[in-house]
Image: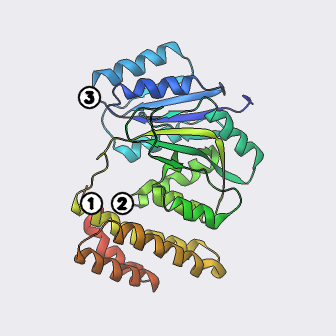
Amino acid sequence: MNSRLVSIGMPVYNGGEDLRRALDSILAQTHTNFELIISDNASTDELTKALTEEYARKDARIRLTRQPQNQGILANFLWVVDQARGDYFMWAAHDDTWSPNYVASLARCLDDAPAAVLATPRTMIDVAKRTGGSFEKVIPPAPNGDRWQTLDLFLTISGVWIYGMFRTEWIKRTSPEFGKYSVLGDHIWLYGMLLQEQVVGTDEAIYYRTQTQGKYVLSTRKKVETLLGVLYHIPRLTWTRLPPEERWQGFRRAFSFIYRRQIRQRNFLGTSLRIAKLTTLLTWFGIDAGIRRMLSPFRHAH
């Protein structure tokens, strides 16, 4: 079970005390053949520096790099992928924890399904930010062998499968696609992957995600930018990556998600609704250039 080397990449910036819990969780894994690649993105808090150095000194499996200057979230995520040497790769968040059998269970999933590129866990979200407390939401792993159920589930879970286990060769080849998307890069990249690749899951691996209330409050501008990005990329990927006989079914499902989650549920203003309708129509008829022009002011806003 411990024969395969698993690369664990942890991009971190000002991790604080939560970082200790995350590191302890990784070092307690029953699958011991792993390398932990920590990239400190020029943190400004002394605790992050002290903790990462402390753990790197006491465990030779930890490879610590402190970036000389902050290179942004995306670049830091991709940097740890580039450093991976194992057969399998997984990202680790600095403020989340895993069940002790997390790595072993996900690795076994990929071992048993040679065609799969991603193994997904059961996710428990604790908004109280106390692992072991009462969990507000439980997200099941991907349904094995059913692409439509997998896509439907993914469109409702806000991208937590990014912290599953990937085949290293595949993720090194495809992860640079993140940079094509101005917003929600990991979500859109994963969605495009699910349209074409096999994904498996297991209830044995449990991912404890801590989330404080109000952590992801977006400005109105960011909401509109996010909406435009989703309206452009989700239908476009659905239409271009599915085989012709499945495109309309996939497109209907994608548009249903966009309406339920991005328009009705978020209660955008009438202006945003008009933009949404126009953008969707343009995408429907394949007029990509028009949408790119609409998105261009937002792509360079940050």
**Where is 44 relative to 164, above or below?**
above
Location of residue 158 by image quarter: bottom left
In the structure shown, which secondary structural element does the residue marked by tag 1 occupy? helix
Q: Could you say where residue 222 lies in the image, as x and y percent from the top left?
A: 27, 60
Query: In terms of sequence position, does the residue under pointer 3 or pointer 1 come before the other?
Result: 3
Distance in Å between CA atoms under marks 2 and 1:
11 Å
**Where is 71 relative to 97, above or below?**
below
Report the amino acid beneath label 2.
Ser
Q: Nearer the viewer, mark 3 or mark 1?
A: 1
**Where is 277 relative to 171, above or below?**
below
Q: Nearer the viewer, residue 271 or 234?
A: 271
Report the amino acid beneath label 1.
Lys
The outermost residue toward the front is: 134
The image's mark for residue 182 is 2
Distance in Å between CA atoms under marks 3 and 1:
26 Å
Name the residue carrying label 3: 44
Distance in Å between CA atoms under marks 3 and 2:
26 Å
Residue lying at 42% horizontally and 23% vertically, measured from the top left: 20
Query: In terms of sequence position, does the residue under pointer 3 or pointer 2 come before the other?
Result: 3
Report the amino acid beneath label 3.
Thr
Q: Mark yes or no: residue 232 visible.
A: no
Quadrant location of the N terminus in the rendered image: top right
The image's mark for residue 222 is 1
Q: Nearer the viewer, residue 60 or 201?
A: 201
The outermost residue toward the top is: 58
Q: Is residue 244 left or right of residue 162?
A: right
Residue lying at 48% horizontally and 60% vertically, measured from the top left: 156
In the structure shown, which secondary structural element does the residue marked by tag 3 occupy? loop
Residue lying at 58% horizontally and 39% vertically, measured from the top left: 206
In the structure shown, which secondary structural element does the residue marked by tag 2 occupy? loop
Location of residue 228 by image quarter: bottom left
